[in-house]
Image: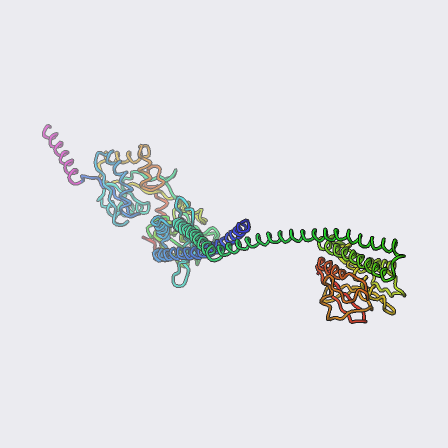
Amino acid sequence: MTTTMQSVRFAGMGIVLLCASVHADLILEVHPFKPPTQLVAAFAPLADYLSGKLGQPVTVRIAKDYQTHIEAIGNDAVDLAYLGPVAYVKLRAAYGPRPLLARQQIGNSPVFHGKIFVRQNSPLQTLADLKGKRFAFTEPHSTMGYLVPRYQLWQAGIPVERLATYQFLGDHVNVALGVLTGDYDAGAVKEDVFELYKGRGLRAIATSPPISDHVFVANRKLPDAQRCTLRAALLQLHKDPKGAEILTSITPGVTALVPVQDSDYDTLRTVLKKLKTIGVDD
Amino acid sequence: MPVVAATRATNRRALLAFIAVLVALVLAFEGVVVWLQRQHLLSDAQEEVRNEMVLLGELAMDALLSSDYAAVERLVKTWLDRHDYLARITAVMPNGFVLADFSKASMPRDTLPVSQEIVFNGRVVMTLKTVSDFSVRETGFAEIVYRATLAAIALILLLGWLLWWTLQRTAIQPLETEIRARAVQETQLRQRTLELEASIQELESFSYSVSHDLRGPLRAIDGYSHALTEDYGHVLDATAQGYIARTRAAAQRMGLLIDELLSLARMARQDMHVTDVDLSALARAALAHLAQVEPHPGPVEILVEEGVHANADTALIGIALDNLLGNAWKYTTRTVAPRIGFRALRQNGETVYVVQDNGAGFDMQYAAKLFQPFQRLHAPNEFAGSGIGLATVQRIIARHGGRVWAEAQPGQGATFYFTLTP
């Protein structure tokens, strides 16, 4: 008994030692939605917070690209990941379920919308009017800057081939400004960017269905206790004295991290499935 | 010396006026120069900003052409932040949309707006409007203007002083010397005039007293001659009585001469009161008086023009007319069908008054002697007279500022002309 106990204890010590040597730091990987230096700086407060809660250092790592990011989580190569909704849907489809920790809430809502818009003084009123017009998207991976609006256009009978031209302008702000300058007749961006530029002369002609926001996913192999600690730490973050600062550092406007389940991404899943049938698979 | 002081004051005024003109000219010149300089400065500054904006446009071009508007915004913002002289940059797109509009926290005091179109392949892709801080240049410029104004004032003062100095040396001092010399001369002249007037007065009082004193003995000669005739006429023969008569006539004639002399002397000193005088009326009255006092043997044809007026001293001009008409009356006493006229005529823009008769006349070669006292062209036994009358006329006319002259021929009558104030 004693021997067993000791062997168990030794085995336990061995695991601890193993973990300590291989996983000296927990790795939080983030997809490259901004320049890496900015992202490291943006997630550093969160990493510090989590380090404190876990009693273990947490390091921020920026994925090379979206695909690599999905693969890293799928292959359990990182402990913790911050994912966009599309990336999550793809991860789930390719690698099966993963432990979900929390999703991000901007303002009062854990879901967000996209807007398809024209200039204030434009004669265009509906999506159907966009036939033969110039359209500005953000970039091919963007949920609200490409995928969802492309689905909306398709539903309205305007596949991109019926547009005069469409361009990827890199980021949401450029799309808003591109329409304002008159270089494009219409564009699609996430709602908060639209709200920011609306006052300078934009008018929405369509709003996307609600899409669940970014999500924190844990490694399947992470011990339950650690996972529970992590989830609790994330869900309690907004109550921390530094919580607001840490949250807005991730993305401006984030007010809390809230509970999440896989079905929250069903709407987006439907959209992506439909897009896949028409050959859109980024 | 008050004349010199007055001249100095006039000179000073002239100099001040000259300096004022100089100041106005220099300031006007400076104003034009300042304006031109400022225009130059402005266009220089604008050109500089334009070049900067063209550069900014070139830097923004790639981002603009690849629809990276946010990058253009950032570039404009960075550009504004990095350039102290820029207060505001606005990027306006061809459709009028203001892509970027950034300002510094505070606007400078003096600003310079510049607008520059950014062109790519002959197409305007953006217009950059800037507001630059012109304060530093403006302040520097104000400093230049301030210095230039000081220099101009110094220049004016220097020129003014030089002018004053030159004027003093070349004109004022010689002028003052001359004025002083003249003042001395004038004082001497005044002194001499006073002396002369005093001696004239002395002479007049002398002649008056002489005339007055002569009258007593004359009256005595006449009186005693008369008494001699009355009391001893019966014992005197005709020759003696003839001598006494001649003595009396000579004494009476001398008395007349003395009277005339006194009157001539008074004439020169009498005060003038010039008023409008009816010369026609005076002439008629004089002739009526003559007709009464010295009646002609036969009828006299009188021709007096009506309404001849003049500005003159009534008493003096009356005496002159009395004399002229008296002469005419006298020298026509032996004329058959005597005729005496008075009229006025216009000659060379002035009024000439004419007294004409058809009497004895005179030889024009003696005309020069006519108006001198005691000069007579006729013997006293032919025509009575003292030789003072025309001299009196001459003086009266001269005192009125006029001239008197005569035309005549022996036996053909005489015509006297006179003018009054020119």
The residue depicted at 21 percent of the width and 37 percent of the height is A57
Q: Nearer the viewer, residue B239 or B86?
A: B239
Whole-percent x and y of residue B1? 53, 49
Which residue is at a point 55% across and 49% down the rendered structure image?
B2
**A92 relative position to B300: left or right:** left
Q: Position of residue A282 (x, y in %)?
A: 31, 52
Residue A78 in sight:
yes
Asked whether residue A133 is drawn in magenta, I would say no
Dominant secondary structure (helix, strand or loop) of the stretch shown in magenta: helix
Question: Given the current orientation, which residue lies at the most extreme left position?
Answer: A3
Residue lying at the far front in this picture: please name it: B235
On the picture, is B343 further left or further right than B72? right
Q: Residue at x 82, y 67 (%)?
A: B357
Residue A5 locus on image (x, y percent): 12, 29
Magenta stretch: residue A2 in it? yes
Span colored in magenta: A1-22
Q: Viewed as shown, does residue A108 lie left or right of B222?
A: left
Residue A157 location (% of width, % of height): 43, 54
Q: Nearer the viewer, residue B244 or A93?
A: B244
Q: Quadrant of residue B30?
A: bottom left
- Asked whether B211 or B15 is in front, the reply is B211
Rendered position, B404 above or below A113: below
